[in-house]
Amino acid sequence: MKLILDQFRDFFSSLRLTVALLVLSIILVFVATLDQVNLGIWAVQEKYFQTFFVMKYFPGSTIPIPVFPGGYTIGGMLLINLVLAHFERFKPQWRKAGISLTHAGIVLLLVGELFTGLFSDESHMRLDEGGTKNFSESFLKREVAVIETTESDFDIITSIPIDRIARSKPVDVPELPFVLRVREGAFYPNSALAMRGPNMPQGPSIANAGIGPQIAVTPMRPTYKPDEVNVPSMFVDITGRDGASLGTWLLSTMLSAPQELTVGARKFRLDLRPTRFYKDFNVTLIDFTHDKYPGTQIPKNFSSKVRVLSDDRSVDRETLIYMNNPLRHGGFTFYQSGFDNNDTTSVLQVVQNPGWFLPYAACALVTLGLLIQFGIHLKGFIARRYAKKSEVTP
Amino acid sequence: MKRYIPIIVGILVAAFALSTLRLPDSKTAFDTEKFGTLPILVNGRIKPLDTVARTSLLFMQHKQTFKRPDGTRLEPVEWLLDVFFRPDLSDDYRHFRIVSPDVLALFSLREEDGDHFRYSFNQLRPAIQELERQAELTFEIESALRTPFQKSVVQLREQMMLYHRLKHSMQLPDSEDFLAEVLRFQEVLPAGVAAARAKSTGTEMNEADFKSILDFANRYEFMASMAYILPVPPPEGSADGTTWFNIGQALQRAFEKQAIDAHVMAYAAMGHAYRAGSHEQFNEIVRIHSEQFEKRFTDKLDRSKVEFRFNHAQPFYKASILFVLAFLLAVFSWLKWPEELGRSAFWVVLVAFLLMTLGIATRMWLEARPPVTNLYSSALFVGWGSVLLGLILERFFRNGIGSVTASTVGFLCLVIAHNLSFTGDTMEMMRAVLDDNFWLATHVVVITIGYSAMFLAGFLAIVYVVMGTITRRLDAPTADALTRMVYGIVCFATLFSLVGTILGGIWADQSWGRFWGWDPKENGALLIVLWCAVILHSRWGGLVRQRGLMNLAILGNVVTAWSWFGVNMLGVGLHSYGFMDSAFIPLVVFGLSQVAIVGLGSLPLPMWRSFKAA
């Protein structure tokens, strides 16, 4: 029994394992970088790094087969290997202080990256000049928003993540007087929409309520290009609590306005939109400027002058967001990310990362450790050279 | 006698280096030096006309030297003067480089019609329409998916466009005498403007005056849209000191101001004198113009003068020649006179290093930037860093190996830099996201030194393998010394790559809000760090010994080259400041050559020529 345990410990603390894991991680990072050309940066992270195994589908099947250890596996094993190796081999001594510090820093870096992957959120806020928003929107995630507008002074929003509804199972929210269910096979991750003309080749629309019947939907392959976005569309059967059909509706991110649905005295709006993250403050874009180098189109600087107003009015200030100078407020950080509409729309990246300080702490440890280690080596090297010289000189 | 060799070599090489500071005697009576120093604005940077001439020549024909059809060699500025003021001559200059046989076929040209694959505007003129049509077809296609033919079409179109815009920069090429034209314009200006005003208010006006002014207006509008260079500084006392104008725009402004800008007049007069071959007149106008400039823009003219000298000195070209010399000296030192030739090699590398330092420092001063701002300057700096480390090794070990590797890596980096200079001005303005001197000075510099160290370690390892397998010279002490060098340099590379990568993460966190985003360039840097970790841990774990360490270090060259150039070819990611795909084949060849050397290094020891018991 003890022998097995020893073998187990020897395996997990061995330098051979370290090297093997490092080589595996090199292969993983390299292949993932190449695959960005096909999949784009987001899908690559999910497929290679935020997973225990890189899966592949056999052609024509839906059974995933693990083909390579993923980021979680390799990172986790490296972590175990590192910690065990330290307990196993390193006796506390000053000579090894640098190495220990460096590795402690790397552990913190890996943990911090895991923490960031699990708990951070990235979204963006598009603001027109003069416009105000109290929410940011997800880059990739979409939601079906059911907005109850019965009361005149407030809305009640029910948000259904697209992954929930896409599975064609009934979505039953107790607060709503109806149940939503996507028609089997009528969820399209990407699609193109066109107005139906009199001579359209397609048959009649599946939709029979809202704007749906006037629109033709063509399913498309999902795109991963950085400059293109997917347009998800779906046909949703809405059934009242009494079992009566309230129609089949087309929902799509391409539709510019929400569709109205009335159930008895209650009024609703239906919308498929980027998932929103509401904040307890408003951001107003006062002015966006985009300087170019004289006589060229090369951007020199972008900046957004914004006003931040919290809901309880305790914060009301103006500030300038520009490259390398974000706005930090309420646990969120706003970065200048892009612009649009002939320099009248500013796009801010909104990041919430409770573990943002971990990499900084890790860096401090690694740098200190390396400097100590390098210093020790250098001292030894120079001392040896001098010793040698004095040997040679009679 | 022998012991004087290092001193003699040192003095000769230093004299060669100092000769860079001398300006060549002008062969023409025209004061091309003063003309070439005149500052103008292009691509957001104020630079001397000489730089425009050189970068245009590099862009169009991949070299700075140019020969007229009659065989006379022209300085770049002289070539530019002809393009500006004698387009009738320059249309016959063969300065468009076309290597694609398919593109040549478009023009029904053959290789022998050109001068080393270079063709003239007049040779290409008949099929310009067809080129335009092919280019329009190509623009429909994403640049990554274009065929070599389509890429060549677009490239040639850009080269011809540049030439066309240069021709329209100082005067309109269809004008017999542009000075006379501008003077006539000045004459009719008051009456013409009055007529135009009258027309807009509907009152009676002189039709002839109106028509003549309309002609001028159309001509200068076209010129304003075509001109490449902005030689007219903002008017004195204007609030915005950055708005320069091209000649066409300055002429258009004459409609409001009722007067023609003095700079336009000066350049038109220069053109007149140049066409007439009257060098006294030309030199006098250039002198007065330069003096006027100096009064207002002392610092800009000073920079221009320095840049002009820097262009002429060509410190990087001279350094590359010295590297070849140093390499030969160091290699011969292994065969004969190790002490004398070895020391000579060291001195030659040192002089080349000083030349590079001077060149890089001048660029930094001209740009007011840290050393690395784009791929071109990264190539210079990688070379500089490797040479510095190699010199330090040579100082310690005194066995010629440091000199050999330093001169090899230095030379290769300068060749890479030269090939990167064909895209235009290498001192370009920084895009907004990169415009931060603090991070450029820390993250970019540190990571680039990491590249330097990786390449140096890799080439030291190549010395080990080649020396060991092909010669009998690799004895145990040398092998031990090389091992210590490679190990030390890999440690150094680990330190810089890791710290540089982490600094990059902090910069990303500051500007994009995330420490790590799996961007290709970030991944490239990470690969170097991981590879260093593999080398060090394999060594510590006893998985590799001397030869294994060397092979891993050689593969480090491939990892570093990939991280440096390969990721830029993917065309994705946020670090797209240096997108390029023309390096693909050289990169593959380099990778394969390294793998081949690793194969050589993996031969079983009995097959090595060294390490044999005597």
Image (spheres, coloured by chain):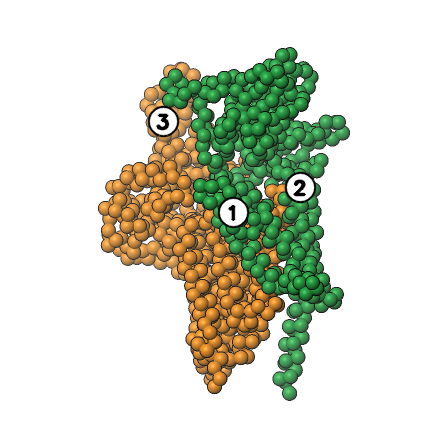
Chain colours: A green, B orange
Residue type for callout 1: Ile
Q: Which residue is mark 1?
A: A65
Residue bearing mark 3: B214
N-term mark: 2 or 1: 1
Give the letter of the chain under mark 2: A
For mark 1, does the 10 Å Cα neighbourhood hold few (<14), some (14 to 19), or many (20 or more) residues? Answer: few
Q: CA distance from mark 3 to mark 1?
A: 74 Å
Query: How far across and how far down the image is residue B560, in percent?
Result: 51, 58
Q: Is residue B431 visible?
A: no
Relative image position of residue B532 (x, y in whole percent): 57, 61
Q: Where does residue A53 sit, x and y in percent of width and height?
A: 56, 48
User: Which residue is most to the bottom?
Assistant: A394
Q: Chain of mark 1?
A: A
The amino acid beneath tag 3 is Leu
SS for dot 1: strand
**Residue at x-position 24% and y-position 54%:** B112
